[in-house]
Image (cartoon, helix red, strand yellow):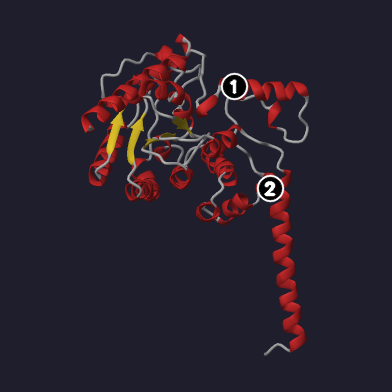
Amino acid sequence: MALNKQQKKGLWRGALTAIITLLIIIAFGYVLTLRVPESYYNTRALYTTKGVNVLFVGNSHAIAGLNARTFGEETKTNALNIATTSQTVLSTDLLVKEAVRTQDVDIIFVETFSMLYPTPSDPTYSDALDADSTVFRSVSGLKDKFLAMAEQPGMRRKFDAFLPLFKYHANWKTPEEWHLRWTNSPLMQESKNDYLAEHQDGTRIIPYVMTPEQYSGYAEYKYEFNVNPAMTANAKYWDSIIETCRANDIDVVFVTLPWLPEFVANTNYSDITAAFTAYFAEKGVTYIDFNTMDFPVEYTDFAMEGPNPNQHLNVSGAEKVTAWLADWYNEEKTSGE
Protein backbone atom coordinates (compact mmCIF):
# COMPACT_ATOMS: atom_id res chain seq x y z
CA MET A 1 0.00 0.00 0.00
CA ALA A 2 1.42 3.37 -1.04
CA LEU A 3 2.12 5.90 1.66
CA ASN A 4 0.42 9.23 1.54
CA LYS A 5 2.27 12.53 1.75
CA GLN A 6 1.74 12.87 5.49
CA GLN A 7 3.03 9.35 6.21
CA LYS A 8 6.14 9.89 4.07
CA LYS A 9 6.83 13.11 5.90
CA GLY A 10 6.50 11.29 9.23
CA LEU A 11 8.93 8.59 8.13
CA TRP A 12 11.51 11.12 7.00
CA ARG A 13 11.09 13.06 10.23
CA GLY A 14 11.53 9.90 12.28
CA ALA A 15 14.64 8.85 10.33
CA LEU A 16 16.15 12.31 10.68
CA THR A 17 15.44 12.33 14.42
CA ALA A 18 17.08 8.91 14.81
CA ILE A 19 20.19 10.01 12.90
CA ILE A 20 20.52 13.24 14.88
CA THR A 21 20.05 11.35 18.15
CA LEU A 22 22.75 8.83 17.22
CA LEU A 23 25.16 11.61 16.26
CA ILE A 24 24.53 13.36 19.58
CA ILE A 25 25.18 10.11 21.46
CA ILE A 26 28.44 9.54 19.58
CA ALA A 27 29.56 13.15 20.15
CA PHE A 28 28.59 12.85 23.81
CA GLY A 29 30.72 9.71 24.08
CA TYR A 30 33.77 11.32 22.52
CA VAL A 31 33.55 14.43 24.69
CA LEU A 32 32.78 12.80 28.03
CA THR A 33 34.92 9.68 27.90
CA LEU A 34 36.81 9.99 31.16
CA ARG A 35 39.87 7.91 30.38
CA VAL A 36 42.79 9.21 28.39
CA PRO A 37 44.95 6.08 28.21
CA GLU A 38 48.63 5.70 27.51
CA SER A 39 47.88 4.48 23.99
CA TYR A 40 46.44 7.91 23.23
CA TYR A 41 49.82 9.52 23.90
CA ASN A 42 51.67 6.92 21.84
CA THR A 43 49.38 7.52 18.88
CA ARG A 44 49.31 11.30 19.15
CA ALA A 45 53.12 11.38 19.14
CA LEU A 46 52.87 10.60 15.44
CA TYR A 47 51.50 14.12 14.91
CA THR A 48 53.56 16.00 17.48
CA THR A 49 57.00 14.58 16.63
CA LYS A 50 58.70 16.12 13.62
CA GLY A 51 61.05 14.50 11.15
CA VAL A 52 60.37 10.86 12.03
CA ASN A 53 62.23 8.52 9.65
CA VAL A 54 62.18 5.25 11.62
CA LEU A 55 58.96 3.89 13.07
CA PHE A 56 58.14 0.96 15.37
CA VAL A 57 54.59 -0.41 15.45
CA GLY A 58 53.14 -3.32 17.39
CA ASN A 59 51.60 -4.22 20.72
CA SER A 60 52.99 -4.22 24.26
CA HIS A 61 55.87 -6.50 23.22
CA ALA A 62 57.14 -3.62 21.09
CA ILE A 63 56.39 -1.04 23.80
CA ALA A 64 58.55 -2.95 26.27
CA GLY A 65 61.16 -4.39 23.91
CA LEU A 66 62.11 -1.58 21.51
CA ASN A 67 63.77 1.56 22.82
CA ALA A 68 63.26 4.23 20.18
CA ARG A 69 65.55 6.76 21.83
CA THR A 70 68.48 4.32 22.05
CA PHE A 71 67.89 3.18 18.48
CA GLY A 72 67.92 6.77 17.27
CA GLU A 73 71.15 7.54 19.11
CA GLU A 74 72.88 4.45 17.73
CA THR A 75 71.72 4.98 14.14
CA LYS A 76 71.63 8.81 13.96
CA THR A 77 67.95 8.65 13.03
CA ASN A 78 64.76 10.12 14.48
CA ALA A 79 63.00 6.96 15.69
CA LEU A 80 59.51 6.84 17.16
CA ASN A 81 57.68 3.96 18.82
CA ILE A 82 53.91 4.13 18.31
CA ALA A 83 53.19 0.66 19.59
CA THR A 84 50.02 0.55 21.70
CA THR A 85 48.59 -1.77 24.30
CA SER A 86 47.02 -4.88 22.76
CA GLN A 87 47.49 -3.39 19.30
CA THR A 88 45.85 -5.64 16.73
CA VAL A 89 46.99 -5.98 13.14
CA LEU A 90 44.00 -3.84 12.16
CA SER A 91 45.31 -0.95 14.29
CA THR A 92 48.86 -1.52 13.02
CA ASP A 93 47.65 -1.16 9.43
CA LEU A 94 45.78 2.03 10.34
CA LEU A 95 48.83 3.55 12.06
CA VAL A 96 51.10 2.72 9.13
CA LYS A 97 48.69 4.57 6.83
CA GLU A 98 48.70 7.52 9.22
CA ALA A 99 52.51 7.51 9.32
CA VAL A 100 52.70 7.60 5.53
CA ARG A 101 50.23 10.47 5.48
CA THR A 102 51.95 12.55 8.14
CA GLN A 103 55.68 11.73 8.13
CA ASP A 104 58.48 11.12 5.64
CA VAL A 105 59.38 7.65 6.99
CA ASP A 106 62.24 5.60 5.54
CA ILE A 107 61.69 2.31 7.36
CA ILE A 108 58.95 0.74 9.50
CA PHE A 109 59.55 -2.15 11.90
CA VAL A 110 56.41 -4.24 12.47
CA GLU A 111 56.34 -6.41 15.60
CA THR A 112 54.55 -9.68 14.84
CA PHE A 113 53.00 -10.99 18.06
CA SER A 114 49.56 -9.51 17.39
CA MET A 115 49.24 -11.70 14.28
CA LEU A 116 49.00 -14.75 16.54
CA TYR A 117 47.76 -13.56 19.91
CA PRO A 118 45.16 -13.11 21.05
CA THR A 119 42.74 -15.06 18.87
CA PRO A 120 39.03 -15.59 19.65
CA SER A 121 39.78 -18.59 21.87
CA ASP A 122 42.02 -16.55 24.21
CA PRO A 123 40.54 -14.82 27.28
CA THR A 124 42.28 -11.54 26.40
CA TYR A 125 40.72 -11.35 22.91
CA SER A 126 37.90 -9.06 23.99
CA ASP A 127 40.30 -6.59 25.59
CA ALA A 128 42.42 -6.54 22.43
CA LEU A 129 39.44 -5.59 20.31
CA ASP A 130 38.42 -3.02 22.89
CA ALA A 131 41.92 -1.54 22.78
CA ASP A 132 41.45 -0.75 19.08
CA SER A 133 39.04 2.02 20.01
CA THR A 134 41.87 3.97 21.63
CA VAL A 135 43.75 4.00 18.35
CA PHE A 136 40.63 4.80 16.34
CA ARG A 137 39.71 7.85 18.36
CA SER A 138 43.33 9.05 18.50
CA VAL A 139 44.16 9.20 14.80
CA SER A 140 43.33 12.27 12.73
CA GLY A 141 42.80 10.79 9.25
CA LEU A 142 39.01 10.51 9.05
CA LYS A 143 38.74 8.24 6.02
CA ASP A 144 41.01 5.46 7.26
CA LYS A 145 39.77 5.95 10.80
CA PHE A 146 36.14 5.26 9.91
CA LEU A 147 37.05 2.42 7.58
CA ALA A 148 38.95 0.78 10.44
CA MET A 149 35.98 1.23 12.76
CA ALA A 150 33.75 -0.47 10.22
CA GLU A 151 36.27 -3.34 9.98
CA GLN A 152 35.75 -4.30 13.62
CA PRO A 153 34.30 -7.83 13.76
CA GLY A 154 30.64 -8.00 14.77
CA MET A 155 27.95 -5.32 14.94
CA ARG A 156 28.48 -4.68 18.65
CA ARG A 157 32.18 -4.05 18.07
CA LYS A 158 31.40 -1.64 15.26
CA PHE A 159 29.00 0.21 17.53
CA ASP A 160 31.55 0.25 20.36
CA ALA A 161 34.21 1.63 18.01
CA PHE A 162 32.01 4.60 17.14
CA LEU A 163 30.73 5.08 20.70
CA PRO A 164 33.62 5.04 23.17
CA LEU A 165 31.80 6.26 26.29
CA PHE A 166 31.23 2.78 27.68
CA LYS A 167 34.42 1.29 26.31
CA TYR A 168 37.35 -0.25 28.09
CA HIS A 169 40.35 1.88 27.13
CA ALA A 170 43.77 0.27 27.07
CA ASN A 171 45.98 1.00 30.06
CA TRP A 172 49.21 -0.87 30.66
CA LYS A 173 51.74 -0.50 33.47
CA THR A 174 50.51 3.03 34.21
CA PRO A 175 49.04 4.83 37.25
CA GLU A 176 45.25 4.83 37.01
CA GLU A 177 44.79 8.26 38.56
CA TRP A 178 45.93 10.50 35.74
CA HIS A 179 43.61 8.92 33.21
CA LEU A 180 40.75 11.00 34.60
CA ARG A 181 40.33 13.86 32.17
CA TRP A 182 38.25 16.35 34.11
CA THR A 183 39.36 15.81 37.72
CA ASN A 184 43.11 16.38 37.63
CA SER A 185 44.52 17.21 41.04
CA PRO A 186 48.13 18.46 41.42
CA LEU A 187 49.14 14.95 42.49
CA MET A 188 47.51 13.39 39.42
CA GLN A 189 49.17 15.95 37.16
CA GLU A 190 52.54 15.24 38.78
CA SER A 191 52.09 11.51 38.14
CA LYS A 192 51.18 12.25 34.54
CA ASN A 193 54.18 14.51 33.99
CA ASP A 194 56.56 11.97 35.53
CA TYR A 195 55.09 9.24 33.37
CA LEU A 196 55.45 11.20 30.15
CA ALA A 197 58.99 12.30 31.03
CA GLU A 198 60.16 8.77 31.81
CA HIS A 199 58.42 7.04 28.91
CA GLN A 200 59.04 9.10 25.83
CA ASP A 201 59.06 7.95 22.22
CA GLY A 202 56.46 5.28 22.98
CA THR A 203 59.00 3.17 24.87
CA ARG A 204 57.92 1.71 28.20
CA ILE A 205 60.99 0.72 30.21
CA ILE A 206 60.29 -2.13 32.63
CA PRO A 207 62.84 -2.38 35.47
CA TYR A 208 61.24 -5.38 37.16
CA VAL A 209 63.15 -8.63 36.74
CA MET A 210 61.52 -12.05 36.50
CA THR A 211 62.11 -14.10 39.64
CA PRO A 212 63.55 -17.65 39.66
CA GLU A 213 60.16 -18.91 40.88
CA GLN A 214 58.34 -17.28 37.97
CA TYR A 215 60.93 -18.60 35.56
CA SER A 216 60.59 -22.16 36.85
CA GLY A 217 56.88 -22.08 36.01
CA TYR A 218 57.70 -22.08 32.30
CA ALA A 219 59.26 -25.54 32.51
CA GLU A 220 55.78 -27.09 32.67
CA TYR A 221 53.73 -24.33 31.01
CA LYS A 222 52.41 -25.23 27.55
CA TYR A 223 50.51 -23.21 24.99
CA GLU A 224 49.39 -23.84 21.42
CA PHE A 225 48.91 -20.96 18.99
CA ASN A 226 46.09 -21.09 16.43
CA VAL A 227 48.49 -20.28 13.63
CA ASN A 228 46.58 -21.07 10.44
CA PRO A 229 43.24 -19.46 11.46
CA ALA A 230 45.12 -16.38 12.65
CA MET A 231 47.05 -16.10 9.39
CA THR A 232 43.86 -16.54 7.39
CA ALA A 233 42.03 -13.85 9.35
CA ASN A 234 44.85 -11.31 9.68
CA ALA A 235 47.11 -11.63 6.63
CA LYS A 236 45.05 -9.04 4.73
CA TYR A 237 46.28 -6.36 7.14
CA TRP A 238 49.91 -7.35 6.69
CA ASP A 239 49.28 -7.39 2.93
CA SER A 240 47.96 -3.84 3.22
CA ILE A 241 50.98 -2.71 5.26
CA ILE A 242 53.39 -4.13 2.70
CA GLU A 243 51.49 -2.58 -0.21
CA THR A 244 51.32 0.80 1.53
CA CYS A 245 55.06 0.79 2.22
CA ARG A 246 55.98 -0.26 -1.32
CA ALA A 247 53.73 2.36 -2.85
CA ASN A 248 55.51 5.02 -0.80
CA ASP A 249 59.09 3.71 -1.18
CA ILE A 250 59.35 2.71 2.50
CA ASP A 251 61.28 -0.33 3.69
CA VAL A 252 59.26 -2.62 5.96
CA VAL A 253 60.82 -5.14 8.33
CA PHE A 254 58.82 -7.63 10.38
CA VAL A 255 60.30 -8.59 13.74
CA THR A 256 59.51 -11.34 16.25
CA LEU A 257 61.02 -10.29 19.57
CA PRO A 258 62.61 -12.83 21.94
CA TRP A 259 60.52 -15.20 24.00
CA LEU A 260 61.81 -17.32 26.83
CA PRO A 261 63.48 -20.39 25.28
CA GLU A 262 61.45 -22.64 27.57
CA PHE A 263 58.25 -21.08 26.25
CA VAL A 264 59.36 -21.55 22.65
CA ALA A 265 60.10 -25.20 23.39
CA ASN A 266 56.66 -25.74 24.94
CA THR A 267 54.67 -24.23 22.07
CA ASN A 268 54.04 -25.14 18.44
CA TYR A 269 56.71 -22.66 17.36
CA SER A 270 57.60 -24.76 14.33
CA ASP A 271 54.13 -23.96 12.97
CA ILE A 272 54.74 -20.25 13.47
CA THR A 273 58.14 -20.46 11.78
CA ALA A 274 56.71 -22.35 8.81
CA ALA A 275 53.78 -19.96 8.34
CA PHE A 276 55.82 -16.78 8.75
CA THR A 277 58.71 -17.97 6.59
CA ALA A 278 56.37 -18.93 3.76
CA TYR A 279 54.43 -15.67 3.99
CA PHE A 280 57.42 -13.33 4.07
CA ALA A 281 59.21 -15.26 1.32
CA GLU A 282 56.15 -14.92 -0.89
CA LYS A 283 55.91 -11.19 -0.17
CA GLY A 284 59.65 -10.62 -0.56
CA VAL A 285 60.08 -8.63 2.65
CA THR A 286 62.65 -8.83 5.44
CA TYR A 287 61.80 -10.90 8.50
CA ILE A 288 63.90 -11.02 11.68
CA ASP A 289 63.08 -13.79 14.17
CA PHE A 290 65.07 -13.53 17.39
CA ASN A 291 63.82 -16.97 18.44
CA THR A 292 65.51 -18.80 15.57
CA MET A 293 68.92 -17.21 16.08
CA ASP A 294 71.51 -17.63 18.81
CA PHE A 295 70.43 -14.50 20.65
CA PRO A 296 71.80 -14.10 24.20
CA VAL A 297 68.70 -13.59 26.34
CA GLU A 298 68.25 -14.89 29.89
CA TYR A 299 65.18 -15.01 32.10
CA THR A 300 66.60 -11.95 33.87
CA ASP A 301 65.97 -10.04 30.63
CA PHE A 302 62.20 -10.51 31.06
CA ALA A 303 59.67 -8.65 33.19
CA MET A 304 58.34 -9.84 36.53
CA GLU A 305 55.41 -11.88 35.19
CA GLY A 306 54.14 -15.39 35.80
CA PRO A 307 53.83 -18.02 33.04
CA ASN A 308 51.66 -16.75 30.17
CA PRO A 309 51.93 -16.38 26.39
CA ASN A 310 52.28 -12.61 26.58
CA GLN A 311 55.81 -12.16 27.94
CA HIS A 312 57.48 -8.76 28.04
CA LEU A 313 61.15 -7.87 27.98
CA ASN A 314 62.49 -5.66 30.75
CA VAL A 315 65.04 -2.87 30.34
CA SER A 316 68.03 -5.20 29.94
CA GLY A 317 66.22 -7.29 27.33
CA ALA A 318 65.13 -4.18 25.45
CA GLU A 319 68.71 -2.87 25.43
CA LYS A 320 69.96 -6.13 23.88
CA VAL A 321 67.27 -6.20 21.19
CA THR A 322 67.55 -2.50 20.37
CA ALA A 323 71.36 -2.68 20.11
CA TRP A 324 71.13 -5.66 17.76
CA LEU A 325 68.55 -3.95 15.55
CA ALA A 326 70.60 -0.75 15.49
CA ASP A 327 73.69 -2.68 14.35
CA TRP A 328 71.62 -4.46 11.72
CA TYR A 329 70.21 -1.16 10.46
CA ASN A 330 73.65 0.47 10.27
CA GLU A 331 75.07 -2.47 8.33
CA GLU A 332 72.12 -2.48 5.93
CA LYS A 333 72.47 1.24 5.39
CA THR A 334 76.22 0.93 4.76
CA SER A 335 75.82 -1.97 2.33
CA GLY A 336 73.16 -0.06 0.39
CA GLU A 337 75.32 3.00 -0.16
Which secondary structure lies at badge 2?
Answer: helix
Q: Which of pointers 1 and 2 indicates the residue nearer the eye? A: 1
Which secondary structure lies at badge 1?
Answer: helix
Q: Please, is residue 54 above or below residue 158 in the view?
A: above
Q: Position of residue 4 (x, y in %)?
A: 73, 89
Disc on res. 30: 2
Disc on res. 197: 1
Visible in this render: residue 183? yes
Residue 280, picture quadrant = top left
Name which residue lies at 51% across and 38% down: 46
Label 1 to label 2, Cα distance in Å? 27 Å
Farthest top residue? 212
Tell me the quadrant of the picture where the N terminus can be found.
Answer: bottom right
- Mark 2 crowdedness (10 Å alpha carbons): few <14, some 14-19, many ≥20: some
Q: Nearer the viewer, residue 337 or 122?
A: 337
Q: Nearer the viewer, residue 94 or 314?
A: 94
Q: Position of residue 190 (x, y in %)?
A: 70, 21
Q: Horizontally, is 6 left or right of 165 in the view? A: right
Are dots 1 and 2 in contact, CB under 8 Å?
A: no
- Mark 1 crowdedness (10 Å alpha carbons): few <14, some 14-19, many ≥20: few
Looking at the rendered structure, the kind of residue marked 2 is: Tyr
Visible in this render: residue 221? no
Looking at the rendered structure, the kind of residue marked 1 is: Ala
Q: Horizontally, is 324 left or right of 13 in the view? A: left
Which is more N-terminal, label 2 or label 1? 2
